[in-house]
Image (cartoon, grey):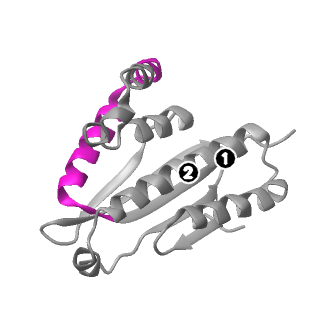
Amino acid sequence: MEKNPEIISYNGFLSYQITGRLIEKLGDLSRELNLNKSTYRKIVTLMVEIIENNYNYVNRLDEGTLRESNQKPFFSVLRSGDYFKLKSGNPILKEDAAALKQRIEHINCLHYRELKDLYMNTMAEGIYDDKKRSGAGLGIMKMAKISKSKIHYNMEKITNNLYYYTIEIAIPTNHKR
């Protein structure tokens, strides 16, 4: 058996249409993967959050900046032992990378109950009223809350103004009985 067999993989710029196709493909594979409904919903929710995160950061880049990066966006779902791992990568502006890193580090330090409280408080404060202020907050919180695990990420410098950001989130496979 392969060590980390890819279930779904996409390399290139992501869009809402591509997200829909990837979700559809996961739906087609769900019986073969023996996914229960809860695990399927978690994977779909995480897919949407991760791809939206990827899409939003890439859309902030102009054509010239995009050409500076020979690394293009990607998204994949792998099975690794008793976990599904969702991975994504994309170029990101230095200023966005710093804020995102700080947000992930903060969220990774929280206990699950603290994370749930922060998520609820952030929702109650109307995070959608000030997207610039919130940055990656709610989506990253939601990913950590669903996975109930730390968010693994990396920021690799490409140029003085550009980094390549990768994220990996794992959730238990929860096979049907």
172 relative to 4, above or below: above
Helix, strand or loop under label 2 = helix
Quadrant of the snapshot with the N terminus: bottom right
Q: Residue at x 55, y 51 (%)?
A: 48
Tell me residue 136's x, y (percent): 35, 43
Tell me residue 50's x, y (percent): 48, 52
Amino acid type for the residue under numbered disc 1: Asp
In the shown orientation, is residue 120 left or right of residue 66?
Answer: right
Residue ID for mark 1: 82
Helix, strand or loop under label 1 = loop
| Residue stretch rendered in magenta on the structure | 91-117
Q: Residue at x 42, y 69 (%)?
A: 73
Single out the residue that lies furthest toward the right.
177
Residue 112, magenta (yes or no): yes
For residue 48, the mark is 2
Say which of 76 and 130 sits in front.
130
